[in-house]
Amino acid sequence: MYLKNALRAATALTFVATAAAHAQSITIATVNNGDMIRMQGYTDKFTEATGIDVEWVTLEENVLRQRVTTDITTKGGQFDIMTIGMYETPIWGANDWLVPLDGMSAEYDVGDLLPAMAGGLSHEGTLYAAPFYGESSMIMYRTDLMEKAGLEMPEAPTWQFIREAAAAMTDRDNDINGICLRGKAGWGEGGAFITVTGNSFGARWFDENWKPQFDQPEWKEALTFFVDMMGESGPAGYATNGFNENLSLFQQGKCGMWIDATVAASFVTNPNDSTVADKVGFALAPNSEGVDKRANWLWAWALAIPAGTQQEDAAKQFIEWATSKDYIELVAENEGWANVPPGARTSLYENDNYKDIPFAQMTLKSILAADPQNCCAQPTPYTGIQFVAIPEFAGIATQVSQEFSAVYAGQQTVDEALAKAQAFTAEEMEAAGY
Amino acid sequence: MARAVTTRRKSFNTALAWAVGLLIFFPILWTILTSFKTEAQAIASPPLFLNFNWTLENYAIVQERSDYMRFLWNSVIIAGGSTLLGVIVAVPAAWAMAFVPSKRTKDILLWMLSTKMLPAVGVLYPIYLLFIRLGLLDTRGGLVVVLMLINLPIIVWMLYTYFREIPGEILEAARMDGATLKEEILHILTPMAVPGIASTVLLNFILAWNEAFWTLNLTAVDAAPLTAFIASYSSPEGLFFAKLSAASTMAIAPILILGWFSQKQLVRGLTFGAVK
């Protein structure tokens, strides 16, 4: 009798335990982009393997940023995994808001993560977020228009060449703009682009004492060059163009060149969406003659675990799965190598199947050419290339980029915008205690 | 002659009304049309109006990717609940202000309305912390309360305006006949103000349905309404306009249908007492 009861109890406990195991669920906040949506489609495979259910909260990038920042700073505990970028990771890691991603399995092979990515997602040598995909920026250009202009794109061109080529490719009668670049206000939009342009002209945001540098000649040269070139060869109304607007123009054959995120390469070479899919070449982002820094950034969307989550182990399991070599193989098997998440692992670029993808090697070269610890020709006190990894940066850079966009729209001069940027940044930095 | 001028003016007014109506409706129409295009057609230049290959692919993708019914149900509960709760709180308040005014009634009304001038983000952190303490994050109940509070000034103002049109003598007569306060509000005032209450309910239901700051910031999985559903299709890095349009069309369809069927009550309520 006792034995029967004991067996019943054990069976019941097993059922409860099994049910509890199946009931384990993690919530992930993420952005809406092709790679992340694709990952959501494969989540069932993770659940099958581990019994852990996954709930997704997908949001637009800026909304996500506000949402996860509010949650992590108030310890709201709404998410077990957050999709964050290179800007947030080192700051949040330094504040102990994230769980360190140490103790990953040997199979995961942390050493295989691209050093630039692992470095940008670490604080004091500790990895706080695992890169799901990484990107830099590069030149995408129309090979047919370049040929028609009688020019040949070097692998590593200068801004001076780009300006000359843009003028030669511009055909206003046929609505072709020699070059399309971001002018839209916002630190992650036009702000990011003008920052790397500044870097490639020898400019920097701050000197070693955190003094803003917009009053220095390098910034004036960079901004004047950008405005003049876009006036000669850019699309009308470029002051409001961001990534999507330029992507749309390029796909419709209205841009000779476009310098933007490497992730765009898969869009512009996709014949389903792009009218110029078979006429696209790639080159490294340019630099000004005599400056050894190029206008290419470094970014990664990465998965991090907020400190205080009740599901730390399950969250780590998911991150290991989603950013593993096996996941890349899984996507390649089902959707082809062109659709695997790029820019995160060294082994991907050593894979013979991936080497055949037209933009793969240029993406890798662009990523390798970007050094977040050493963004600029002159010494700086900060890390980051298209951003400065301090909490105050997003607010300051948004305001500064609004001033620059006003120049692009013809509402003020370069000198006026730089003077305002200098005064505003100095005031904010002083108020922040720098 | 006078008749001819009147007819011409009438025709002009009709044409003008149609033109303004179409202008206002055009963004919605364009969203609906875009939802039936491919992503390439959605960004075509010059834009394609009707001459494109119509497809339901975007709707199929959205259906496959998202649990639309869950978002819809949350929207119905949150918008409906906050409106109902708002009316329950606002009717007695508006009654007091309309029929038993004090020297400070106007000031109170203006003060209530002035709370709408505060940018929502200014109180995001206090509300968020309060929600954490009360365990209300990602709950429909929490959002019902927040949206009710946000829309309460408008509800009170609208009801106050309608109640002021009702002669106080009728209520006095009811009181003399022995009606209690509850009976006076429920059986005398409310039936007379039905058009006004109906339009207030409809307008606030629409406002709550479309609210996209608190509903995005205070929800995650369980209580996320259709605003979160739309936000999940917006992307600054990638052209997904056709899918976003399909999601938007699905999100606004219920409220459009509701507005269409109740437009008579809505117009009647909004113009109630407009001409004296």
Image: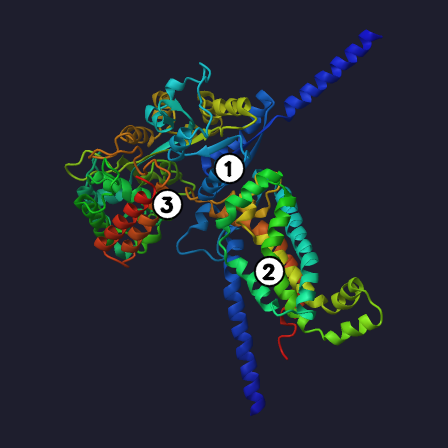
Rendered residue at 82%/73% (across/down): B176
> Quick check: A293 above or below B249?
above
Q: Identify which residue, A16 or A56, lies in the foreground.
A: A16
Residue A393 disc label: none
**Left or right: where does residue A71 sit relative to residue A249?**
right
A378 to the left or right of A240: left
Judged left or right of residue A123, residue A145 is: left
Residue ID for mark 3: A395
Whether callout 3 and callout 1 share a subunit is answered yes
Say which of A64 and B118 sits in front.
B118
Label 2 to label 3, Cα distance in Å? 32 Å
Q: What amino acid is at disc 2?
A: Pro
Q: What's the residue at 25%, 45% (across, down)?
A: A145
In screen coordinates, is B225 left or right of A106? right
Callout 3: helix, strand or loop?
Answer: helix
- For this orientation, the residue located farthest to the bottom is B1
**Are discs 1 and 2 less than 8 Å apart at CB?**
no
Identify the residue at horizontal 48%, vertical 50% (top origin).
Answer: B122
Give the SS element for disc 2.
helix
Please name the residue that numbered disc 1 is placed on. A74
Per the image, the residue denoted by label 2 is B153
Where residue A85 sits: x, y (%)?
A: 40, 34
Disc 2 crowd rating (10 Å Cα; few below 14, some 14-19, many 20+) is many
- Subunit under mark 2: B
- Assign a secondary structure to mark 1: loop
Answer yes or no: is residue B245 visible. Answer: yes
